[in-house]
Image (cartoon, rainbow, N blue to C red):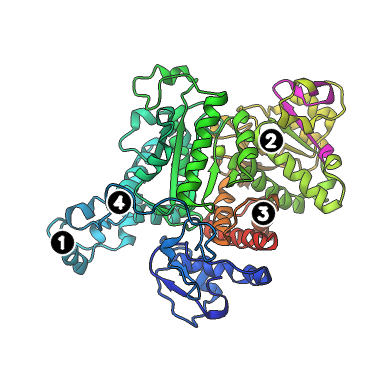
């Protein structure tokens, strides 16, 4: 691995792709040295042989937005020959494509076009020398400013907007004009800007995507493109792609079917891959698969940007997805990571089951959310006491997030106690729209709910389920806002000294309860976290700061670890490793303040830790 053994070299070429494979015996050292590698990816320094990197530099370097290629000089191949996520040192994963087959060629922008190229434009930060070298003298006013001043000005502009959607639009405009500045802004102001480029504002942006649409972002693949998907991938200007986030827009956050307008989600998720995980933007590809929408409002909206037809399903849907998945592997190799995002339950589980053995895929809503919640629970145990096995979990919502989290909890208990999974699942109960999931409902249950059907009398309402199951942990994954009522939280508080309450649904409007409600109704005793952020709450003269239980803590680091290690499959143990790595970042001070997640301000360091643990696990797994 890059820096181990001091026999490697870093080139200033903005890429992760040169990280080469390691043997299994080296895995121990990965866990120690990987953060250094992560740091190096973000530095612009050219490191020659025998350079050692201090641990402090990791944290410093993580704050620089651009990435650097890491190359193993012992490898014969040049990094540009890479087909997938890492250098193909063993010739295993060369994509079957001809690489130079697009009908146009890429040239380095200069002059006027350089100023209109978001990837290379620096605006007023171009130096005198650069203005001469790139033929832009005269195209800019004389002043030369540094990036810090640019950040200061942009933040002042953004703060002037009162409406979050306007802030979102300003951020998207910046991404279109000066990508480097966009990421610097996001990295340096992560807590302030995350709610803008991500949940909750991105939800509203998707709802209004057609009417605020200016320039296309990402790649749109629709039913009309059947048989041509591979050609379409070639139209994308970058050939070396390492992460794809794809949606079909059928279940955007808790907002339902937004069809083609779901594109805001892959775009937002991938900007976090860069800002939170240090992955170079050009390696990231947002994709929306448009198979129609069942959202009547959108179908009748004159500004709707997608296909005006009902959703394709069954064979037609499966064939398009299959063509897509094959084309992706053919074009980018077996090490390209595909993150499924915001698919509806009925497709999400099937797609994951179908492609997890042939592709490097994970479903963020099932697995990413599970990993972040498990991590929060590991930390919560330090506040409430006991081991996971001592607790009882009740979910409202038995879809992707609910059953995904439930399974990871049961798996972790099983690992800790050596009790079979079938038994540990009995610690976990789920309520769906028809009530408690129980044995007598087995025949009519969707397949992903069946493992959670335990022996019990029918219970219709959540409140009654709380009273009869007597959970210590209540988790909302229903997509339905205001479902943790005063009575529900009071019941949880009468059963538990410190009830653990997680209201995971996004955006804020869909949250099962607000932070204020959780603290007020539990008389300040709840250990609370939510999917979308809430401002601190004052209760009885004390300030309560709640954590954000959102998969954004996990996917950038998980993805980075997968890419770095050259993994070709995602294993549940990697998700467990990510959970533990995140929980390790929660300090006593955080816990003393009731926080079960570390603040987002340190997210790049946190992602580096997660990546290191995930990569270590990948090597352990062979
Ligand atoms: O996007 C988010 O904030 C978390 C998530 O995956 C979802 O709610 O679907
Ligand atoms: Mg999602």
Q: Of the numbered discs in the image, which one, if any, rests on residue 574?
A: 3
Q: Is mark 4 within 8 Å of ligand 1?
A: no
Q: State the CA–CA distance, disc 4 to disc 2.
A: 39 Å
Report the mark closest to the observer, 3 or 2. Answer: 3
| Mark 1, secondary structure of its residue | loop
**Relative to residue 112, is residue 565 drawn left or right?**
right
The answer to whether marks 4 and 2 mark residues whose Cβ atoms lie closer than 8 Å is no
Observer-nearest of 622 and 34: 622
**Relative to residue 503, is residue 91 drawn left or right?**
left
| Mark 2, secondary structure of its residue | helix
Residue corresponding to mark 1: 135
Residue 15 lies in what quarter of the image?
bottom left
The answer to whether marks 3 and 2 mark residues whose Cβ atoms lie closer than 8 Å is no
Q: In what quadrant does ligand 2 lie? A: top right
Q: Of the numbered discs in the image, which one, if any, rests on residue 598?
A: none
Residue corresponding to mark 4: 118
Q: Percent x, y for residue 606? A: 58, 59
Membership of 237 in magenta stretch: no
Q: State the CA–CA distance, disc 3 to disc 2.
A: 19 Å
Indicate the quadrant containing the C terminus: top left, top right, bottom left or bottom right: bottom right
Q: State the CA–CA distance, disc 3 to disc 1.
A: 49 Å
Which tag, 3 or 4, sits closer to the chain's start? 4
Q: Percent x, y for residue 404? A: 69, 39
Q: State the CA–CA distance, disc 1 to disc 2.
A: 56 Å
Residue corresponding to mark 2: 402
Residue at x-position 54% and y-position 70%: 36
């Amino acid at each position: 691995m890059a820096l181990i053994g001091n026999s490697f070299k870093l080139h200033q070429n903005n890429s992760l792709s040169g990280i080469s494979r390691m043997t299994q015996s080296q895995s121990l050292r990965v866990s120690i040295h990987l953060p250094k590698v992560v740091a190096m990816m973000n530095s612009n320094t050219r490191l020659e042989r025998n350079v050692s990197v201090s641990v402090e530099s990791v944290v410093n370097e993580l704050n620089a937005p651009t990435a650097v290629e890491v190359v193993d000089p012992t490898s014969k191949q040049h990094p540009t020959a890479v087909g997938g996520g890492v250098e193909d040192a063993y010739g295993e994963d060369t994509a079957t494509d001809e690489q130079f087959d697009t009908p146009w060629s890429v040239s380095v922008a200069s002059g006027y076009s350089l100023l209109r190229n978001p990837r290379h434009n620096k605006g007023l930060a171009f130096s005198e020398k650069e203005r001469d070298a790139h033929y832009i003298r005269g195209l800019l006013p004389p002043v030369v400013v540094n990036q810090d001043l640019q950040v200061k000005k942009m933040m002042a502009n953004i703060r002037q907007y009162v409406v979050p959607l306007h802030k979102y639009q300003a951020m998207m405009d910046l991404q279109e004009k000066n990508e480097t500045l966009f990421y610097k802004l996001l990295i340096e102001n992560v807590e302030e800007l995350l709610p803008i480029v991500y949940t909750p504002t991105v939800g509203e942006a998707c709802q209004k995507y057609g009417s605020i649409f200016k320039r296309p972002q990402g790649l749109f693949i629709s039913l009309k493109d059947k048989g041509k998907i591979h050609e379409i991938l070639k139209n994308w200007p970058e050939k070396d792609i390492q992460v794809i986030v794809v949606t079909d827009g059928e279940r955007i956050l808790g907002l339902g079917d937004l069809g083609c307008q779901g594109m805001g989600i892959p775009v937002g998720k991938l900007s976090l891959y860069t800002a939170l995980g240090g992955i170079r933007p050009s390696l990231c590809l947002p994709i929306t698969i448009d198979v129609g929408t069942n959202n009547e409002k959108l179908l009748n909206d004159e500004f709707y940007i997608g296909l005006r037809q009902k959703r394709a399903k069954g064979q037609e849907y499966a064939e398009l997805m299959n063509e897509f998945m094959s084309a992706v592997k053919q074009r980018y190799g077996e090490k390209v990571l595909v993150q499924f995002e915001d698919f509806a339950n009925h497709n999400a589980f099937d797609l994951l089951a179908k492609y997890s053995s042939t592709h490097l895929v994970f479903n963020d809503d099932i697995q990413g959310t599970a990993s972040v919640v498990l991590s929060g629970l590991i930390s919560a145990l330090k506040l409430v006491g006991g081991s996971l096995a001592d607790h009882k979990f009740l979910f409202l919502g038995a879809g992707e997030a609910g059953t995904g989290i439930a399974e990871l909890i049961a798996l972790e208990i099983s690992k800790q106690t050596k009790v079979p999974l079938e038994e540990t699942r009995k610690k976990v109960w789920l309520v769906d729209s028809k009530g408690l999931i129980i044995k007598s409902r087995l025949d009519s249950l969707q397949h992903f709910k069946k493992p959670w059907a335990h022996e019990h009398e029918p219970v219709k309402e959540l409140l009654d389920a709380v009273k009869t199951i007597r959970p210590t942990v209540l988790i909302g994954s229903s997509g339905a806002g205001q479902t943790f009522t005063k009575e529900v939280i009071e019941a949880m508080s009468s059963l538990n000294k410190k009830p653990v309450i997680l209201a995971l649904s996004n955006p804020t409007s869909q949250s099962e309860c607000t932070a204020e409600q959780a603290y007020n109704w539990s008389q300040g005793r709840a250990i609370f976290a939510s999917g979308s952020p809430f401002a601190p709450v004052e209760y009885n003269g004390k300030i309560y700061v709640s954590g954000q239980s959102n998969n954004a803590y996990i996917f950038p680091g998980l993805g980075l670890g997968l890419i770095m290690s050259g993994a070709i499959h995602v294993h549940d143990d990697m998700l467990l490793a990510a959970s533990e790595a995140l929980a390790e970042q929660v300090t006593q001070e955080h816990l003393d303040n009731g926080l079960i997640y570390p603040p987002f301000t340190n997210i790049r360091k946190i992602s580096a830790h997660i990546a290191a643990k995930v990569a270590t696990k990948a090597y352990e797994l062979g």
